[in-house]
Image (cartoon, rainbow, N blue to C red):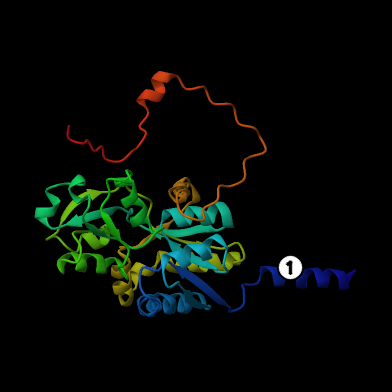
Amino acid sequence: MKLSQGLAALVFSLLAAPSMAADYTLAVEPNYPPAQAQQVYKPLLDYLSRSTGHRFILKTATNYHVYWRDLRSNAKTDFAFEEAHFTDYRIDRLGFTPLVRVAEATRYTLLADAPVAEGGVPGLIGYRVVSMPAPSLGYLLLGELYKNPIAQPEIQSVASNWRDGVEMVFAQESEAAMVPNYIAQLYPNLVAVSESREFTGRALSAGGTVPADVRAAVSEAMLKLHQDDALYEVLVELGASQFVVATAEEYAGNESLLRGVFGYKAKPASATPEPEPEPETDEALDDEEITGGIEVQADN
């Protein structure tokens, strides 16, 4: 009896003990070339290592196409720091849990020189607009502005980071650039042609294989990050004042932005049959917007 009680106590103590030091990967969107990303995120990784006792390794991709491929195939990563559409995808499809998020909401701005901006969104049709590639949030939101395939700007996905797009406007290599608001705020000499709706700020989420005590330690460290003066530049680079607690409900539904992206597959239908939709009347069909985007009329 004493032996069995001792074994039970030993098992309980092992289960309750904190996780031993281990390596954890942190995936980030390819907003920088890989070498630059290592420099940008190194202070944050070092901070997390000091705060939690574990080692954190950055995982990024050469571009958004590779990143999206890895996300769809559930390539192994322990943590991810991403915009709302990717965060919701991981929560809904891959069993990730959001831990903390950037306190500021995400909004994207279409920037241009004042003379170009005077024409508004329609004035950029046929002109060069630079953005990070699909399926970055900026690219997808730019697509929402120009839904009509015959009335679009020449969208260029050649920037290596968000700031590059603005620099291309200054160099007259592009007429406009789609950038996050925290980048747009750095260039008051450019004019906002359009601003997107708000999204919940970028989130740091954890995979289901990360132990609970490690999640808790990472969350605690991130919530205190703004108190470390040595990491001020990290927050500035990330466009954040601080991190706050995140919930899955804040990101629900944002995965829908990915529906038109190559390789996206809808989740299997629920076993419970949904009610049949009401048949549409001719009047309803007449009122429905068919082409979307900007209406273009030809001269008589």
Q: Residue at x 58, y 26 (%)?
A: 276
Q: Is residue 187 left or right of residue 240?
A: left
Q: Residues within 10 Å of mark 1 (few under 14, many from 20)?
A: few
Asked if residue 210 lies left or right of residue 129, the reply is right
Q: Residue furthest left?
A: 115
Q: Nearer the viewer, residue 3 or 246?
A: 246
Quarter of the image where the N terminus is located: bottom right
Front position in the image: 245 or 298: 298
Q: Quadrant of residue 272?
A: top right
Q: Is residue 170 above or below residue 83?
A: below
In percent of width and height, residue 56 lies at: 49, 77
Q: Is residue 197 visible?
A: no
| Residue for point 31% across, 67% down | 158
> Horizontal and vertical percent for residue 15?
70, 68
Query: In the figure, is residue 283 to the left or right of 163?
Result: right
Q: Is residue 261 above or below residue 64?
A: above
Q: Furthest residue to the right? A: 1
Between residues 77 and 114, which one lies in front from this camera angle?
A: 114
Quarter of the figure that contains the C terminus: top left
Please tell me whether residue 53 is drawn above or below residue 75 in the rendered image.
Answer: below
**Residue occupying image coordinates x 22% and y 52%:** 126
On the question of residue 118 being in view, the answer is: yes
User: Given the current orientation, which residue lies at the most extreme front position?
Assistant: 300
Q: How many marks?
A: 1
Rendered image quadrant of residue 13: bottom right
> x, y (%) of residue 244?
40, 58
Q: Secondary structure at mark 1?
A: helix
Residue type at the position of mark 1: Phe
The residue pinned by badge 1 equals 12
Could you say where residue 206 lies in the image, as x and y percent from the top left? 53, 63
Q: Decide if residue 202 is on the left or right side of residue 49.
A: left
